[in-house]
Amino acid sequence: MPSTRGSFSGVVGEDGVQYSFAMEYSGPPVTFDIPKAVPIDVETIPVASVVAQVSLSDKLSLPVVQPILPLDNRSKMFSKELKLLGCEPTVSPTSVIDGHECVSKEITLGSEASVSPHSVTAFESGVTDNQDCVLSGELCRLGALEFSNGRYGSSELLEMVNVCQSRSSISHGNSHELVGGAGSSGMFEFSEGIGKSGELFGSSCELRASTDFGKENLDANISNPPDWASSESVLSLDRRSSEVSSFRSANGKNLSTSDFKRPVVTFRGVDTDSSVNEESSIFEAKNSGFQKEPYNEAKKGKGGSCYRCSKGNRFTEKEVCIVCDAKYCSNCVLRAMGSMPEGRKCVSCIGFPIDESKRGNLGKCSRLLKRLLNQLEIQQIMKAEKLCEANQLPPEYILVNGKPLSHEELVILHSCPNPPKKLKPGNYWYDKVSGFWGKEGQKPSQIISPHLSVGGPINADASNGNTQVYINGREITKVELRMLQLVGVQCAGNPHFWVNDDGSYQEEGQKNTRGYLWGKAGAKLVCALLSLPIPSKSANSCGEQVHNLDARAVPDYLGQRTLQKLLLVGHYGSGTSTIFKQAKILYKATPFSYEERENIKLKIQSNLYNYLGILLEGREHFEEETLADMRSNQSSDESSAAITSLSPLMTQGATDGNFAKTIYSIGPRLKSFSDWLLKAMALGNLDAIFPAATREYAPVIEDLWNNAAIQVTYSRRNELKMLPTVASYFLERAADILRTDYEPSDVDILYAEGVTSSNGLISMEFSFAQPEPDDSISTADQHDSLLRYQLVRVPARGLGENCKWLEMFEDVRMVIFCVALSDYDQFCIDGNGPPMNKMLLSRRFFESIITHPTFDQMDFLLILNKFDLFEEKIEDIPLSLCEWFDDFHPVTSRHRSNGNSSNINSNPTLGQVAFHYIAVKFKRLYSSLTGRKLFVSSVRGLEPTSVDSALKYAREILKWDEERINFTLSEYSIYSTEASSFSQ
Amino acid sequence: MANKEMSVTELREKHMAAAETVNSLRERLKQKRLLLLDTDIAGYARAQGRSAVTFGPTDLVCCRTLQGHAGKVYSLDWTPEKNRIVSASQDGRLIVWNALTSQKTHAIKLPCAWVMTCAFSPNGHSVASGGLDSVCSIFNLNSPADKDGNLPVSRMLSGHKGYVSCCQYVPEEDTHLITCSGDQTCVLWDITTGLRTSVFGGEFQSGHTADVLSVSINGMNSRMFVSGSCDTTARLWDTRVASRAVRTFHGHEGDVNAVKFFPDGNRFGTGSDDGTCQLFDIRTGHQLQVYQQQHSDNEVSHVISIAFSISGRLLFAGYSNGDCYVWDTLLAKVVLNLGSVQNSHQNRVSCLGLSADGSALCTGSWDTNLKIWAFGGHRRVI
């Protein structure tokens, strides 16, 4: 801690800024790791064979623990000195030397700065930020001040030189200063800070109070705290300040030989010339020297010194930025590179592509980092470095058969069974038939997986051969020809060979296979001798694997990019879960795992018990009713009493059997089961006792179902409001389902309620099945297969206007809104109000979703689900039952062709007419609220093809959306939005 | 049938009447409180001649930027020791950071990318996360990664019927965790068994009547915790008494997005959609202070997240418009706006947390970054 405090007080002076944060963290990582590193250093140093350096690097790591006390003293001293400087120019000699030493060093460094190539680019990007600096630079003297604040000072003195040469060249100087800034972190912040300090100085300059000026200078430093604070690592501070001491001692030796003090003198001279306040400028100069000492930002490491602290030399261990080649010593690397989200890059380099020459080093950790960080941290950095998108090989740098690759092609190339080894940017040729791969103009270097759809068609002169012998349309090289001759292939008459991936070859235009290249005696030996490639052992049946997408791991960075999220929402009962299940069954090789199936089985069985319970309850109810009817017939005078005494009579009737049996009566065994089941349901613990009960009651169920009373009740199931419509599907197979060896089929799962948890969000990733590989497949289609979709179903609950989490879905590509068409005659109780039509509830929900700010400008696909049910229902129940649809007056005649053909030429069914009517209703509603077009699709959730085509429709909408930009308006019409007709 | 119908209507009437009574009593209680509450903290402090905290530019500075998430950061939590941070982001990852070196130590891919909350266990060996999948997942940081390099879920706490909006480990207890959820309940979990120990709210009358968005456990007495909900109330619970809330705190006019116990354990702060932060006393049930910044336009920006400094003198509050105020809790004055200083976040601050020793503040933002702010200057820790 004291060391931290020391360096800060060196900056802030009288304020005595302390970083309590640092105190807490003066932690193990430093003390643990660094001692380990020392022996390693010693090992490497003999290579350097410079004695002085050895001692220096030793000091680098050693003082970590020791310098705490001495540094504390030192820093106090500094702050004292600063105060002194602030008021009077009487400075202790050592500190002056320190300052000068530092400043002068920067001067020399700064003059080199313009040489480095990448500084030029930094200059370009920095130009826009110059204005602030120019402002402050109006007073030449101030140019120096801003640098002292920016502390990116390597070139600052260079600027001073410029200033002294011609004051009009300030902007030039500024650009240099920005060059300096570029090497360090946070260039933009830096220039901002400068602007600020420059203004401050401007005001202070007007005051012209020389004594105040130094103070002002200090204040200005304080005024841009983030600038320096962000660059203060507690850890590195500890170490850096420790290094300061070593650095000082090291430089102390050199000091005598160099004329380091000179520049400061000229600097002062300049200011005197510029006839501003001489005294203040002296302070500033000195101040700047002091400030920079802890973290001066020398731009170019002269002699290999650190780009940030400009200490050390080419023998000190450093970490290199994989983008800009900046080198940082162990003290600065964590500050300069931050949390390294893309590996070892300067903070300002994040997001930029890496220097290709360093690609080989990706993911290879240096000793320096290992010393600084623990194993887990290094793992994360190296993983990020290797896998992050910005560091990937740019596909356009790789040309295969003269055509730059796309991202997807590169992935194909990388993920094939035999990928090209050590792929570097360059021109390659690829023989798709045989899998030969080589650099443009050279003999083949490798045999990779054949039949990959990457690059263009191969050229005859791909390998620059001149033998007039052709293999798969490529003129082969002399070496290859020699190989062919050696293994005994007839090459007389300049034949054109056709070589397959298995090595079989034939002459062009002939049917017969002439032989197998690799089966020939000595073929592989000859190839090895001539350094020609031989097929790798695993080269087999590649064609299969190329198309099997699930087997291939799409890299994470690409996976994220190509993943298109589809949000599936709908009111309760709209069939979203059926669609989700259907999609799972459609697109997943194994839609449900074993455990899932087991759970589903249990769920279906317990559902069935529930349905039975509802039936039994209904039976009791019907029995009561019938009994009451019978009794009221018998004794009409006691009709009023019959109602009140119904239940006691009921029990009597069941136990005594005094009353005549109704058709709803059941035997005692079934009765006891019925009582048990209803009791369990009433207590709500059916789920708790359920699995054990299955075995026990399975035989009863069969009897029960076959019982006439139950069958009669079942025939009146329409009156049982609690019984869902799907119940009949399961009830009719009750006996089968309740067997312990029952295995739910996909259809069972589709019909089952509550299989997808209605509580939470569920999602699945899928890609549409690859169409059958045939000749007509264009490469574009192949790339589509890389596109992955994520279907996300969210529960409708809580999706109100004030939904807290809907904003999480701002990155979805499309919202699929589900409405059950058959809801138009359904009512449900919403809150305390009167029952509301479910279609109107859906509409309200739809309105709230489409107008939600998160889904602004989002595509919506409306799925009108349960079309099959709807078609049945509309024949009996008029659509106008829902008040929203009261103006539905179908003009079609009742006479129409039966059958399910949706051919528009034939007369549409009433259901289709009604569907279109409802679709238009929703479309109008949508466009009135959002001014955009709504996509609508009718779906029968239980039919796989129907769901498949709806989701493919969604895909087409997305695809169309993407390509809309590329096409002019007139070409829109070419694009059919029908899923099947899309090609190219 | 008829008498059944009758009883239903009767019950409904009775319920209406009871609700009426409750409301009138509540109103009387409010009036009484207003009578008793003749001053607020700020008024009293001013009367005592206290002056507001002032911050120099160096007093709270950003000293680290943790980059590495690819999506909006939604939640963060510090370890009680060792200065590690776990953060949860919309990129579907939890990242465990070393706050010292600003490096990642773990990047955990979540089974459900829509994560809303995360928490560090007291011993620092595991992290918990919850989100829209309605499950709270526990990850043991020491368990080996699978072949894809992902850390497996070591325990799934499932049972909520709505999204898990917030979770916190019971201090000093690595096996107990409290979550709150969109199903209007809070749940105390036993992590070893994966079962619910108690459920707070839900079917009970004194529970929240809307989504619960936030919980905070009393640091002084870990049996007490407070929850904030979309029903505009905050409720105080005793983990031993699941049947009813100890106290219900009214006062906000919007969803209570954040609750946080005051360091002394006798008060807690809330942040709400109505744009205010409020301070409540758990013993008297009084609202002690309202922290509200008057804006020239009538745009109310929601308070998203709050945190207290170690002494309680400062209240950090992140707002939906990107502001992040540092309030002087005593004088109800804004000391600093972290949203407008240099190096500040580019988007709203969605989560806040103080390190256990109070020396640093971590903010997570929708700009995908986290920043660590350290207290500088002579005041060291405030």
Image (cartoon, helix red, strand yellow):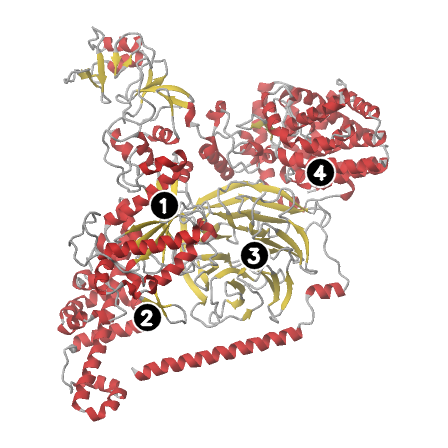
The residue furthest top is A492
| Mark 1 vs 4, N-terminal side | 4
| Mark 1 vs 2, N-terminal side | 2
Which circle marks residue B302 in the picture? 3
Which x, y percent locates residue A284?
79, 32
The reply to whether the C-beta atoms of the residues labelled 3 and 4 are less than 8 Å apart is no
Which circle marks residue A790 in the picture? 1
In this picture, residue B151 sits left or right of residue A448: right
The residue positioned 14% from the left and 18% from the top of the image is A511
Which circle marks residue A196 in the picture? 4
Q: Which of these two is toward me, A752 or A381?
A: A752
The residue positioned 36% from the left and 29% from the top of the image is A409
The reply to whether the C-beta atoms of the residues labelled 1 and 2 are less than 8 Å apart is no
The reply to whether the C-beta atoms of the residues labelled 1 and 3 are less than 8 Å apart is no
Question: In terms of secondary structure, where does tag 4 sit?
Answer: helix
Q: Amino acid at mark 2?
A: Gly
Q: Which of these two is toward me, A697 or A298?
A: A298
Pointer 3 indicates a residue of which chain?
Answer: B
Q: Amino acid at mark 3?
A: His
Q: Amino acid at mark 4?
A: Lys
* Discs 1 and 3 share one subunit: no
Per the model, the C-alpha gap separating discs 3 and 2 is 41 Å
In this picture, residue A953 sits left or right of residue A169: left
Which x, y percent locates residue A815?
38, 49
Pointer 2 indicates a residue of which chain?
Answer: A
Question: In terms of secondary structure, where does tag 3 sit?
Answer: loop
Q: Nearer the viewer, mark 3 or mark 2?
A: 3
Question: In terms of secondary structure, where does tag 1 sit?
Answer: strand
- Crowding at dot 3, Cα within 10 Å, few <14 / some 14-19 / many 20+, comes out as many
Q: Which quarter of the picture shows residue A493?
A: top left
